[in-house]
Image: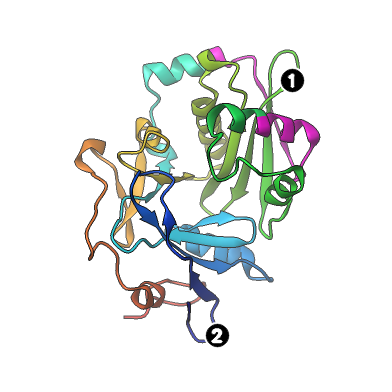
Amino acid sequence: MRHSLPLAPQFYVTAPQPCPYLEGRMERKLFTALQGENAGRLNDSLSHQGFRRSQNVLYRPSCTDCAACLSARINVAAFKPTKSQRRTQRRNADVSRRATSPWATEAQYDLFRHYLDSRHADGGMADMDVFEFAAMIEETPVRSRVIEYTGPDHDLIGTCLTDVLSDGLSMVYSFYTPDMPRNSLGTYLILDHIEIAREAGLPYVYLGYWVPGSQKMGYKSNFSGLEIYAGGKWKKLNNPDDYTPETHPLSSDPIAEQVANIALPDSRPAR
């Protein structure tokens, strides 16, 4: 099914399929192509409205009877590390960071496979081959970087594909070695992106979706300064326990209404 606005990107809806985060539920996504000379501005505008990028596609959950997935970002100025997060920073004091152009390497793919086989062997990316991996890293029409992390022996231990938005960093996809559990590398990569954003004067770090009730996606509420996109605006997440995976036939607006209320570059949402 296709929905569009005059002189605007065309929006599509995926067919329902099993939700990867909450058992027994079905997911559906609203998406549009990201291409052309306006790609950067479109990525900025839609990221500010809860969309995420995957290669040359921007998508947002649009499930028929569930509104559990909430886009999340960290307000850098409001972030204060916990004692546990400070310990994580100290344990990774000898980790080095290097930012590169979005170019895939064999070392990245080997680390990616090791990460998936250990953490997400039954996930949607489990069968991704080296060519699909290269496409995930390299097919970006916007300003992107690959942030690589190496240990004291110079081995690659973590990687994050990161978009640079007008107001922050968007962590598109990250992976790391599962062989260093005490280092909490998943947490460390987020902490380091907060520091990169702070150094660059960018106010936000976009984390993707926070899903209350999901073990895979619930960890994001451990970061102070977290904001979620709900009801058409960003709001501070005060108490994560106040949010439950909402399920109701009226949880989501009709697709046509959702599309009509998307603010595009140099446009205002229709009313």
Q: Earlier in the sequence, mark 1 or mark 2?
A: 2
Q: Which residue is mark 2?
A: 7
Q: Tell which of 99 and 174 is nearer to you.
A: 174
Name the kind of residue labelled 2 in the image: Leu
Sort mark 2 into few (<14), some (14-19) or many (20+) by Cα contacts within 10 Å: few
**Position of residue 32 measured from the top left corner of the image (x, y, whole percent):** 54, 69
Q: Is residue 41 left or right of residue 241?
A: right
Q: Is residue 239 above or below residue 34?
A: above
Q: How is the image coloured?
A: rainbow
Residue 255 in the image, given as x and y percentages of width and height? 37, 73
Occupied quadrant, residue 112: top right
Q: Helix, strand or loop at disc 2?
A: loop
Question: How far apart are the two marked residues, 1 and 2, measured between alpha carbons?
Answer: 49 Å
Where is 26 relative to 117, above or below?
below
**Which residue is denoted by mark 1 in the rendering?**
155
- The stretch of residues the image draws in magenta is 91-113
Which residue is at 52% across, 45% downward?
A: 202
Q: Which residue is rendered at x = 22% and y = 36% of the image?
A: 241
